[in-house]
Amino acid sequence: SPDRPADVWTIDGARVRPITTINPQVATWKLGQVRPVSWTNSRDGQAIHGVLVTPPGYVPGTPIKTVVQVHGGPEWAWWSGWLGSWHEWAQMLATHGYAVLLPNPRGSDGQGTVFARAVGNDWGGMDYQDVLDGVDMLVAQKIADPARLGIGGWSYGGFLSAWAVTHGDRFKAAVVGAGPTDMTAMARITDTPDFTTGYFGEPSAHLADLDRASSIRSLDKVHTPVLVLHGEQDTRVPVTLGLEFYRGLKLLGKPAEMVRYPREPHWFHEPEHQADIQRRVLAWFDVHL
């Protein structure tokens, strides 16, 4: 549930009984309010769903600083459940005064195969428009302060966050976590080459498509402070992609920082690093929003 981490339960007929209470301290926490939200894409009318988390005690109609966190995948989805993992920042941010939009743009699970495959050769296209329209909804409802918007995410979420800052100034701060910012290089060096082939086709025949989906080609358009986070042992999205993006920004005099985590693959394992990510994400948005 949104206010309780997973535990082990038994079901005996109509009787449901908890076996464990692993995190009893959570019952005393003041957590953000979690609710499903929906909107439509302004270009083609596609219905888009997601989750909104607002701070404890939030007064409706009060515009506040807002972060969009894009999930990985892209074939994955946010849900109205417990959001407490190292790569799930919504509750952490909400308890510090942020509204957090968790969009499920096209490419996500949950709306069928056609919807999930709709980003083939279109990363950064209609999926990004789906996200922008969700932000517009929150601004129109006087939830999001349009002058205090941030974006972040891990893996594909890092991709779309990098795309956002290289294709506009809507967001005032960004966190790019293990993001494939150079799809041409990604197709050649990832440990899962079938992944990029599945979305873009055979690399040598689709270099123009891969290049078009590479945020690294538009670094000169960045005006947003960017925090790059990456594991040094990442073979899915190798750390060289994060370094390329970060160093390119710095060479152009753009506001950027990078943290490289030793021993970490694409999905972090060490609790100290997991906690460090949460602290750095909060600090970055606190400073820039």
Image (cartoon, rainbow, N blue to C red):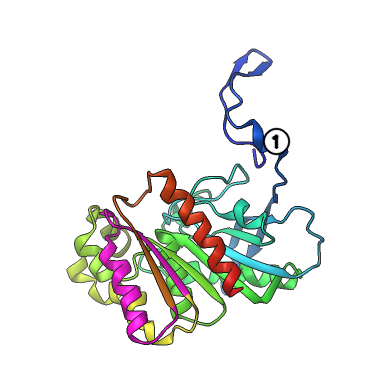
Image quarter where the C terminus lies is bottom right
Residue 25, percent from left and from top: 65, 35
Residue that numbered label 1 is attached to: 27
The reply, left or right, for residue 66 in relation to residue 205 is right
Q: Nearer the viewer, residue 235 or 45?
A: 235
Residue 80 image offset from top left, x and y in percent: 63, 46
90 in the magenta segment: no
Q: Residue furthest top?
A: 12
Work out whether residue 96 or residue 112 is closer to the camera in this orientation and state it.
Answer: 96
Residue at 43 percent of width and 86 percent of height? 221
- Give the magenta range: 226-255
Nearer-the-camera pick, 209 or 226: 226
**In which quadrant of the rendered image does the N terminus lie?**
top right
Amino acid type of the residue that numbered disc 1 sits on in the rendered structure = Ala
Q: Residues within 10 Å of mark 1 (few under 14, many from 20)?
A: few
Element at label 1:
helix
Residue 118 in view here? no
